């Protein structure tokens, strides 16, 4: 008896999904399986951005792609051969986000209570600038290989430690959260920060998406 396969999608997007204070611009590449409803992914991404202290209001791009797309990006931007599961492309420096356990010391974050029209943000290079009234800051983009999520989950290489056999949908949710925290200045190169990042991911995934 043939096993059921996830439904694949034609090229979709970017499709804006509004979950105040964020807008998620979702793009699903042609032929990529739909493992998790778009609205659910957007809610999980919103929860991760709130947990990471992302500036508000803001927009973020989420691209669901395949191994070939991730392999090309991995080679072009990281200098590594072969596909990876998720890549994040932040447009803001770590100083735009609150400090966190194990992270590098950084200046105080912008005053989140200030009106959006007066909130100061410093880009990766160049002087600080003021957002015009009503403008939505773009935080960057997250690109996930759904193909890799499926393979890792099926092979028992899913989860935070790469040793978990669970559903491809669970793996995809983890990768979206992981990519969002990278946008917010989190990393896992150092043990203390890596442990704190894993704990925050578990808390986000274990709580109802807000």
Image: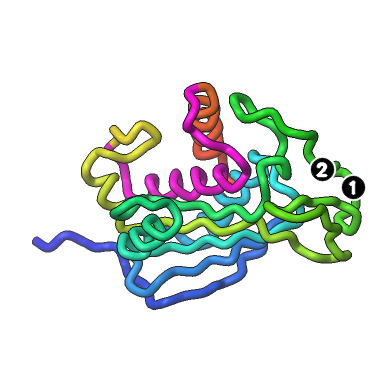
Task: Indicate whether 21 appears above or below 163.
Answer: below
Element marked by disc 1: loop
Q: Which colour scheme is used?
A: rainbow
Judged left or right of residue 59, residue 4 is left
- Residue located at (52% from left, 22% from top): 192
- Residue located at (37% from left, 73% from top): 9
Q: Quadrant of residue 138?
A: bottom right
Magenta span contains residue 185: yes
Task: Indicate whether 35 appears above or below 180.
Answer: below
| Along the viewing direction, whichever of 33 and 81 lies nearer the viewer | 81
Q: In which quarter of the image is the N terminus?
A: bottom left
Q: Can residue 20 be seen in this view?
A: no
Q: Can residue 78 be seen in this view?
A: yes
Mark 1–mark 2 CB contact (< 8 Å): yes
Element marked by disc 2: loop
Q: Is the magenta stretch mostly helix, strand or loop?
A: helix
- Residue located at (73% from left, 44% from top): 96
Q: Quadrant of residue 164?
A: top left
Closer to us: mark 1 or mark 2?
Answer: 2
Point out residue 187 in the picture as x, y percentages from the top left corner: 53, 36
| Along the viewing direction, whichever of 143 and 14 lies nearer the viewer | 143
The residue that disc 1 covers is: 114
The residue that disc 2 covers is: 110
Task: Indicate whether 5 appears above or below 174.
Answer: below
The disc at residue 105 is none
In the rendered structure, which segment of residues is drawn in magenta? 165-191
User: How many residues crowd around disc 1 within 10 Å: few (fewer than 14), some, or many (20 or more)?
Assistant: few
- Residue located at (88% from left, 65% from top): 133
Point out residue 207 in the picture as x, y percentages from the top left corner: 55, 37
Point out residue 120 in the picture as x, y percentages from the top left corner: 84, 51
| Number of dots carrying numbers | 2
């Amino acid at each position: 008896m043939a096993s059921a396969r996830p439904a694949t999608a034609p090229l979709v997007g970017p499709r804006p999904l509004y979950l105040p204070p964020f807008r998620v611009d979702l793009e699903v590449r042609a032929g990529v399986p739909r493992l998790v409803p778009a609205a659910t992914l957007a809610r999980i991404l919103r929860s991760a951005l709130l947990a990471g202290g992302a500036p508000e209001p803001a927009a973020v791009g989420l691209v669901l792609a395949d191994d070939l797309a991730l392999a090309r990006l991995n080679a072009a931007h990281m200098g590594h051969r072969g596909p990876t599961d998720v890549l994040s492309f932040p447009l803001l420096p770590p100083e735009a986000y609150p400090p966190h356990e194990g992270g590098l010391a950084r200046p105080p974050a912008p005053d989140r209570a200030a009106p959006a029209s007066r909130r100061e943000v410093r880009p990766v290079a160049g002087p600080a600038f003021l957002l015009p009234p009503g403008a939505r800051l773009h935080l960057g983009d997250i690109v996930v290989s759904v193909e890799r999520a499926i393979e890792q989950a099926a092979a028992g290489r899913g989860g935070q430690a790469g040793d978990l056999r669970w559903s491809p949908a669970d793996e995809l949710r983890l990768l979206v959260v992981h990519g969002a925290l990278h946008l917010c200045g989190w990393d896992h190169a150092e043990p203390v920060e890596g442990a704190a990042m894993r704990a925050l991911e578990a808390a986000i995934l274990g709580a109802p998406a807000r």
